[in-house]
Image (cartoon, rainbow, N blue to C red):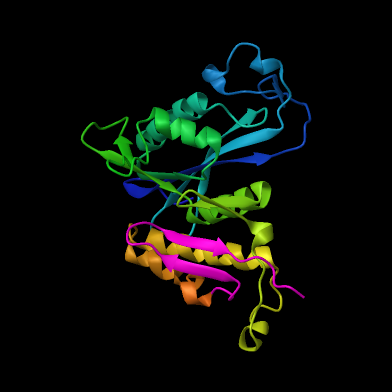
């Protein structure tokens, strides 16, 4: 691995599911496979079998490599308060090794949101807070970035789970959004189900809103997902309100 000396980069963390198993490590006489957050392990948790691993990783902004810094065994999702403590601790260790941590990134899971919230991060539209004080240098800030692909994934998963969404307080059921593609649209939509079409449109709408607050490089990578309201199949009426997001109304299925 290249030297970390004065190497600016981003700290990433995520959880992955693993199979429950116990292993005895002779080198330090340690039993592996139980919940272990080092000194942050809560009483009683070290008796639970681990089925997830919390991974902390560092990647420089200019470099084609990444380095796993530390892994921790967890039972289901790690508590947000514990994740926040481990995050700060890993940042300190990296800085002591010579790295320059300028940002952290993660997905938008409940425990991660809780961890970032405890560090002062919030999405208040009137006064958003996207950075927190560096634990090693009070005059530096560490910026937080929610992984954009996970934003789209969460939108898709939530819509498929609940089957409805709200636009200006109007509830719309995905099952009621019936697509009637015209002859010119049939080929483009041939491989898409009704739900996939509306989810694709919503992803484009999020990308459009995301472009208003993000850097140019990020926007360029998202432009391929954008659709205009006129690109929706004709069974959905779309109109832009004077001030506010898109307003969609699903038409009832035609009489056959």
The residue drawn where x is 45% and y is 25% is 85
* Residue placed most toward the observer, 73 or 234: 234
* Residue placed most toward the observer, 52 or 186: 186
- In which quadrant of the rendered view does residue 88 lie? top left
Where residue 255 sits in the image (x, y, percent)? 73, 73
Outermost residue, bottom direction? 184
Say if 209 sits above or below 232 in the image.
above
The residue drawn where x is 37% and y is 37% is 122
Outermost residue, top direction? 43
The residue drawn where x is 65% and y is 12% is 44
Outermost residue, front direction? 255
* Residue placed most toward the observer, 203 or 50: 203
- In which quadrant of the rendered view does residue 38 lie? top right
The residue drawn where x is 43% and y is 28% is 89
Q: Main secondary structure of the magenta part?
A: loop
**Which residues make up the magenta segment?**
232-256
* Residue 158 painted magenta: no
* Residue placed most toward the observer, 161 or 73: 161
Say if 46 sits above or below 203 in the image.
above
Where residue 177 sits in the image (x, y, percent)? 64, 64
Where residue 200 sits in the image (x, y, percent)? 57, 66
Where residue 149 sits in the image (x, y, percent)? 53, 56
Q: How many marks?
A: 0
Relative to 34, 5 lies left or right: left
Q: Quadrant of the C terminus?
A: bottom right
- In which quadrant of the rendered view does residue 188 lie? bottom right
* Residue 237 painted magenta: yes
């Amino acid at each position: 691995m290249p030297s970390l000396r004065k190497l600016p980069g981003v700290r990433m963390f995520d959880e992955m599911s693993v199979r429950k198993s116990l292993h005895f490590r002779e080198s330090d006489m340690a039993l592996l496979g139980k919940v272990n957050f080092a000194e942050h392990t809560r009483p009683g948790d070290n008796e639970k079998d681990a089925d997830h691993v919390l991974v902390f990783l560092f990647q420089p902004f200019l470099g084609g490599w990444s380095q796993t810094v530390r892994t921790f065994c967890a039972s289901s999702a790690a508590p947000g308060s514990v994740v926040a403590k481990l995050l700060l601790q890993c940042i300190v260790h990296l800085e002591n090794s010579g790295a320059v941590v300028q940002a952290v990134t993660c997905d938008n899971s409940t425990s991660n949101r809780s961890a970032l919230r405890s560090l002062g991060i919030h999405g208040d539209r009137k006064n958003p807070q996207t950075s927190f004080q560096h634990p090693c240098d009070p005059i530096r800030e560490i910026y937080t970035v929610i992984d954009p692909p996970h934003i789209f994934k969460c939108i898709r998963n939530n819509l498929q789970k609940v089957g409805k969404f709200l636009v200006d307080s109007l509830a719309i059921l995905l099952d009621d959004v019936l697509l009637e593609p015209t002859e010119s649209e049939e080929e483009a939509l041939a491989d898409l189900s009704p739900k996939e079409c509306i989810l694709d449109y919503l992803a484009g709408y999020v990308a459009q809103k995301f472009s208003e607050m993000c850097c140019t490089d990020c926007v360029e990578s998202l432009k391929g997902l954008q659709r205009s309201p006129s690109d929706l199949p004709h069974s959905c009426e779309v109109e832009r309100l004077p001030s506010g997001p898109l307003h969609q109304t699903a038409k009832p299925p035609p009489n056959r």
